[in-house]
Image (cartoon, rainbow, N blue to C red):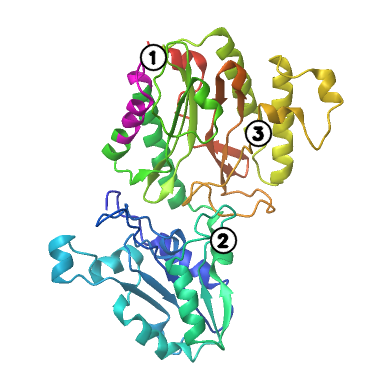
């Protein structure tokens, strides 16, 4: 693995917390993600199922975790099934984890080969009353039209064990994963630290007429150099009017002299993510108008992030953030105070220039699992990302940090990433 091995005490604790929420005499089965194929004989880089990773730390395909805390035989209470290396795999792909390595990573003593899963499960299944199975329950899931390993496991279990009760493992992991442990926070801080150095590299490399993808290359070089697994998501390097398209990521335009660049990117380190956004001038000096817009967004970030604290209701936070943005839009001359006073509350005027939410959970997923009906609590990590987009002026500005919620407010994990106008201009000299 590229990253330093995570202490297996993290996964031991996570399993204990999961087991404590299981119904009596039930079995939980967590599956790995599939390997996704490109054309011909090539495959995409493997990305692990985050619920499985959360409970065992194994970052390898064809992995199954079985938890049966009420099993009569002690050795059946926690079993990890992994892929066995054979001569073909060893020659073409390299060796997979040994049983000893899997124990070291996960803290699980009983390791079996994945081809023995069905037989071993049958030894236990008829003692149990039900199963917990995983599924992608994210609000914005992209696997709804694609059959996954989780889908196949659900079909297989219900066909083989139709009279058992079935429960949702994701309901448990969603509740647990929102609160980060100290080990998880350290991993997220590492991802944030790599983001900081990556951003500084981009500032040094930027100059008029450079291509957006050249700046993207600076990000990728730096994250690989420092042991990150991959980009947390496809980075956005949007110069000029491109920044007004919220999910622009073709990154193939020329960065012109007077343009401002919106750089939205994240680093995935040990499967934990950062998510940051900064804006900066191509030529190293903000125009007066760019400064005005930037300063308004920065004000919203500084004031809005203070609202991310224990006890805050997420919807109330977002409402107060829109009030901040609305006032800045009036100050910038984009909205008229009288028109705002008479606006239809169902169609607020600010949405022409500020059209997205500004705080999401972050962790093993960039948009991490979690219900926004749950009050903000200590140990959660949120982004804060206000933005103003003025298509008619070719200016799009968004600024984003990652905040750990503490008992006394929040801690900015990305504090070291330059954000003040003077600091950015000085670094670009």
Question: From mark 3 to mark 2, how far is it between C-alphas?
Answer: 25 Å
At which x and y percent is residue 332?
68, 15
Is residue 384 in sight in this rendering?
yes
- Element under label 3? loop
Q: Under tag 1, what secondary structure?
A: loop
User: Which residue does the numbered mark 1 point to in the structure image?
Assistant: 428
Are the two marked residues, 3 and 2, in contact with CB atoms closer than 8 angstroms?
no
For disc 2, the marked residue is: 137
Task: Characterize the local packing of mark 1: few (<14), some (14-19) or many (20 or more) Cα atoms within 10 angstroms.
Answer: many
Quarter of the image where the C terminus is located: top left
Instruction: From the image, tell me which residue sits under label 3.
Output: 355
Figure check: 49 above or below 388 = below
Residue 191 at x, y percent in the picture: 40, 41
Whether residue 10 is situated above or below residue 124 in the rendered picture:
above
| Residue 305 picture quarter | top right
Which residue does the image show at 50% across and 87% down from the upper left? 161
Mark 3 or 1, closer to the camera: 3
Q: Magenta segment, which residues?
A: 203-220
């Amino acid at each position: 693995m590229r990253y330093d091995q995570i202490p297996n005490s993290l996964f031991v604790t996570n399993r204990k917390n999961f087991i404590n929420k299981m119904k009596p005499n039930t079995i939980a089965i967590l599956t790995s993600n599939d390997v996704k194929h490109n054309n011909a004989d090539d495959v995409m880089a493997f990305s692990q199922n985050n619920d499985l990773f959360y409970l065992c730390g194994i970052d390898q395909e064809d992995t199954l975790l079985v938890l049966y805390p009420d099993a009569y035989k002690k050795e059946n209470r926690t079993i990890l099934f992994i892929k066995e290396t054979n001569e073909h795999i060893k020659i073409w792909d390299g060796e997979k984890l040994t049983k000893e390595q899997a124990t070291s990573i996960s803290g699980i003593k009983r390791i079996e080969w994945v081809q023995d899963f069905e037989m071993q499960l049958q030894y236990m299944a008829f003692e149990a009353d039900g199963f917990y199975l995983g599924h992608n329950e994210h609000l914005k899931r992209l696997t709804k039209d694609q059959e996954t390993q989780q889908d196949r496991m659900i079909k297989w279990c219900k066909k083989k064990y139709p009279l058992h009760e079935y429960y949702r493992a994701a309901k448990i992991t969603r509740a647990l994963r929102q609160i980060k442990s100290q080990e998880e926070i350290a991993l997220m801080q590492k991802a944030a630290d790599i983001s900081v150095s990556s951003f500084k590299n981009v500032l040094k490399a930027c100059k008029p007429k450079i291509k957006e993808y050249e700046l993207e290359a600076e990000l990728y070089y730096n994250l690989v150099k420092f042991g990150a697994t991959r980009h947390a998501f496809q980075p956005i390097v949007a110069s000029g009017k491109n920044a007004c398209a919220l999910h622009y990521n073709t990154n193939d335009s020329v960065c012109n002299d007077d343009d401002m660049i919106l750089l939205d990117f994240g680093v995935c380190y040990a499967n934990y993510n950062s998510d940051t956004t900064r804006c900066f001038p191509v030529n190293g000096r903000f125009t007066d108008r760019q400064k005005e817009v930037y300063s308004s967004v920065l004000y919203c970030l500084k004031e809005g992030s203070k609202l991310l604290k224990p006890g805050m209701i997420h919807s109330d936070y977002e409402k107060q953030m829109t009030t901040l943005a609305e006032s800045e839009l009036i100050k910038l001359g984009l909205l008229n105070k009288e028109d705002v006073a008479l606006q239809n509350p169902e169609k607020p005027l600010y949405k022409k220039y500020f059209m997205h939410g500004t705080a999401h959970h972050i962790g093993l997923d960039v948009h991490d699992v979690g219900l926004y009906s749950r009050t903000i609590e200590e140990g959660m990590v949120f982004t804060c990302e206000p933005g103003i987009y003025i298509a008619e002026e070719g200016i799009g500005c968004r600024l984003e940090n990652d905040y750990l919620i503490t008992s006394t407010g929040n801690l900015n994990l990305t504090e070291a990433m330059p954000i003040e106008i003077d600091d950015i201009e000085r670094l670009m000299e």
